[in-house]
Image (spheres, rainbow, N blue to C red):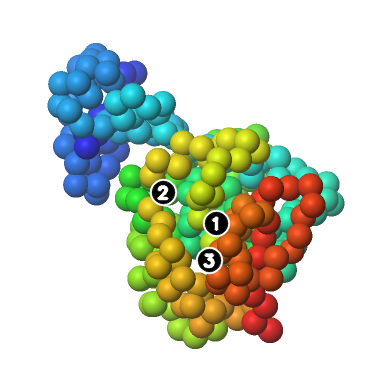
Amino acid sequence: MIVTAAGNAGHSQTMMAEEAAKKLGAEYKERNKKSISWLIETYGKPVLVIGSGRFEYYEEGNEPFFFHPNSSAFRLKRLMNGENDPLINAAGLQKGNSFLDCTLGLGADSIVASYIVGEEGSVTGVEKNPVIGYLVQQGLTHWRTTNPQLERSMKRIKVHIADHVSYLKTLEDRSVDVIYFDPMFSSSISESSGIEPLRRYAEYDEESLHESVEEAKRAAKKRVVFKDHYSSPRFETFGFKVQVRPSSKQQYGVINLE
């Protein structure tokens, strides 16, 4: 992978690009007014571009991947207006709880969870892909919004770049209130189009998910929650009780440990 700064980047972005290259084990290249397509074609590698408040990952033939709050922004507004959120209901999350998101992705669910648990609680996200993990980690820190509650919720999330099975094995028994899984659906769902670019980076397999769920049941105090397509056999396979939402193709399964 090549790391470079945006075309109009200042000194701070250039320094950040150099640091990102070292952290990710990538090559740093001066931009020198070259286009992204030129860099990809010349070096034959994907390119990570460090800009002011926005980092973009380019692969040949694909739209750039970048962090954005996705659905969390309007979900927070609904919660602030006194409406319900299906994840929060399924998880039974409360102020001061700890929440572990084993499949962080763009972090929308973790952002919503962070808003609910507040400063007294904690939210940790685990992402296996180092590039996605880095982009989301930086995005959660540097994204600017007119909603201060959203911004504070993003900044409170701790990101670990790791395999979720390995990470779960480091946890003590009953050490996290709620542990959550949202693996990529086996088929595309139109209402989830905001996360569609993540699909090509998904690295889940049934064996690792099964092991992770077993570890989660050991490490969770209150609940383990699993999100999937309504027709997925994984709810039954992994032992989750589905909380049926008739109007949605996305369903939440719950293992209650209390």
Using residue 62 as the reference point, say whether residue 236 is left or right of it: right
Mark 3 = which residue?
100
Residue type beneath disc 2: Ala
Residue 222 shows which numbered tag?
none
Q: Nearer the viewer, residue 241 or 147?
A: 241
Residue type beneath disc 3: Leu
* Number of marks drawn: 3
* Residue 214 place in picture, x, y as percent: 49, 78
Mark 2 = which residue?
202
Residue, x 74% and y 64% (percent of image)? 243
* Residue 199 place in picture, x, y as percent: 45, 42
Residue 182 shows which numbered tag?
1
Residue type beneath disc 1: Asp
Q: Quadrant of the C terminus?
A: bottom right
- Whether residue 213 appears in this view of the structure is yes
Task: Give the CA separation, mark 1 to mark 3.
Answer: 11 Å
Nearer mark to the viewer, of 1 and 3: 1
SS class, disc 3: strand
Q: Quadrant of the N terminus?
A: top left
